[in-house]
Image (cartoon, helix red, strand yellow):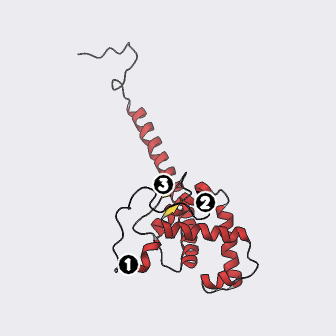
Amino acid sequence: MPIDRSSPPMFGQHVSRRGLLRTTVAIAGLALLADLAGPLSAVAADDAVASFTQLSEFLTGYTLDPVLGARFLAALKKRDADLDDSMAALSALIKQSGVPDMDGFLALSGTDPALMKTATKIVSAWYLGVVGEPEDAELITYADSLMYRPTKGLLTIPSYGPGPNAWGPKPGSKI
């Protein structure tokens, strides 16, 4: 079937070499820009995760998985817009005080309660494997949560719960 050049081109009918070349160069340019922008944001994200993991290792006393650290950090940031500032202040206090471990940190007097709350959020997340309250809880890990680490190799990690409301009410609740 002959092509009617008097009608407007439809998809796939008239592709000029120049048009194809322009499109190819444009796509290559966009890909190059994406490659340049990607590592910059990845480096910033890697630094944030490394800082969070390092702080978490100090607070928990364990060597931790940075992949889980990235997931915990993202979940904590969703719930606390000031987390970066709080973590920076907490890290600065730890460095300034020169305490060797969490026991030394807990023995410090006059620590800002907001910094203690941040430390508690981080430790709680790692130990429970969950971030948030029951209404918006986000499970990050189950088997790798730190609550199972002391008995690792001795007891099997439970694979199911005993039933609904088996744990009872939250301590301090009015139920």
- Looking at the image, residue 115 sits to the left or right of residue 30; the answer is right
Q: Position of residue 55 (x, y in %)?
A: 58, 74
User: Which residue carries the number 3 mark?
Assistant: 35
Mark 3 is on which residue type?
Asp
Marks 2 and 3, the one that precedes in the sequence:
3
Per the model, the C-alpha gap separating discs 1 and 3 is 42 Å
Q: Are marks 2 and 3 in contact (CB under 8 Å)?
A: no
Residue name at image x 50 percent, y 56 percent: 138
Q: Position of residue 160 (x, y in %)?
A: 35, 62
Per the model, the C-alpha gap separating discs 2 and 1 is 31 Å
User: Which residue carries the number 2 mark?
Assistant: 173
Please name which of the two marks, 2 or 1, marks the residue nearer to the observer.
2
Residue name at image x 42 percent, y 74 percent: 148
Marks 2 and 1, the one that precedes in the sequence:
1
Mark 2 is on which residue type?
Ser
User: Which residue carries the number 1 mark?
Assistant: 152
